[in-house]
Amino acid sequence: MLGNGGRRLCAAAVALAASVSTVAAANADPASPDAAPAGKELVVLGDSFSANAWDFFDQDNSCLRHGRTAWPVQLGRLMGVYGTDEMADPSCPGASIDSGPGWSLAQEAQKADKAGAFGPNTKVVTLQFGLNDKWGKNDQTLWKSLQGCVFNLVDGCDPESIDQGRMPDYNGVSGALMAKRMSNAVTYIKYYAPNARIVFVGYPELFTPGSSTVCLSIGGIAPFIQSRGRAVVEYFDRIDQAQREAAQLLGIEFLDSRALTTGHGLCSSQPWLNGVFDPRTDLDGLFFHPSSQGDAVVANAIYDRYGH
C-alpha cells in the first residue's frame, strides 16, 4: 500500500504526464490503492507501421483492425500473449506523437491505461511514432505529401518542395524536440509500468539512405520511379536519427529496424515492403508498409532482446 510519500510521488508523476493521466485519474479510487492493475505483458503504441492495416469502413477511427501478420501480432504470438488479456494494442494508422488529427501517443496511452495495460507485470511497451507528425515551419504531413510531392513527376520532390508546402519540413526534425513531445507519456509509462522495457521501434528501410530515388512496384512488373525524391529520403533519414537521439534522451531502448531491413527497401530486388499488388511481397498488403517477412524480422528482434 502506498504511504504519503508514495502518494506524493504518484501525484508528481501524474502532473508531469497530465496529457496521459486524465482518464486514469478520473477512474481511480484513491481509497483502494491495492486495486491498481497488474498490467499486461505486452503493450503496443504506434502508427500504421505497427498496425499495418487500414480499415476504409472505420469512419470513427476506432482502430480495431490490425494486419494479420503485423509485427505486434507476430511478437504477441512469440510471447504467447496474442489473443489473450495479456496484450493491449491500440496502435492506429495515422497516429502521431501529438500532431493529429488522428490518434496521438497520449490518447493511445490513455486507451491502453483504461484497459489496465500498465502495471508491475508489464514486460514490454513499444512505441513507433514520428512520420505522421508536423515539423518545422509548415503544417504538411507525409501522408498529404504523397500526391503533391512523392507522386508528382512534373514538379518532383526535391528540397525546394518544403518551401512550396508540398513536403514536411525535415529541417525541423530533431531528437531533442521529439523527446520533448514524447516525454509526458514516457514518464507516465515508466512510473506505472516500472518493470517494463520501453522500446522505441524505428522504421524499416524504405529507401537507401542518402539517395534521391523513390520507388513503388506495381504488380511486380511496372515500377513507379520518382528520380527527384531527395526530400522524401532525407525526411526518413532525419526521422531515423531523431528517434535514436530521442530514445537516448528519454532513457528508453531503441530498436534499429532500418539496420535489420537494410537492402530490402522498396527499390530493391527483394523488397520487404509492399508495393501495389506485388507478388514478391503481400498482394493485399498496405503499400509503402512492411510485408509479412519484413514484420517478422522486427518481431523476432524485439522478442529476442526484450520479450523473454
Image: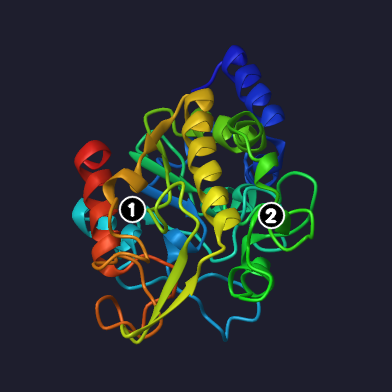
- Secondary structure category for the residue under label 1: loop
Q: Read off the residue under disc 2.
A: 168
Q: Amino acid at mark 2?
A: Pro
Q: Is residue 59 above or below residue 73?
A: below
Which residue is identified by label 1? 86
Asked if disc 1 and disc 2 are in contact, CB closer than 8 Å, the reply is: no
- Residue 40 horizontal/vertical position (percent): 38, 47
* Quarter occupied by the C terminus: top left
Tell me if residue 90 comes above or below residue 2 in the rendering: below
Q: Nearer the viewer, mark 1 or mark 2?
A: 2
State which quadrant residue 295 falls in. bottom left
The residue sitting at the top extreme is: 5
The residue sitting at 53% across, 27% down in the picture is 250
Residue 86 horizontal side relative to residue 113, left or right: left
Q: Residue at x 62, y 14 (%)?
A: 4
Q: Residues within 10 Å of mark 1 (few under 14, many from 20)?
A: some
As drawn, 1 above or below 113? above
Is residue 129 left or right of 122 when viewed as pictured? right
Q: Does the image show residue 124?
A: yes
Give the image location of residue 105, x and y in percent.
60, 49
Earlier in the chain: of badge 1 and badge 2, it is: 1
Q: Which mark is residue 280?
A: none
Instruction: Say which element carries label 2.
Output: loop
Spatial separation of the CA atoms under disc 1 and disc 2:
37 Å
Q: Residues within 10 Å of mark 2 (few under 14, many from 20)?
A: many
Is residue 83 found left or right of 190 in the rendered image?
left
Of residues 26 and 31, which is closer to you in this image? 26
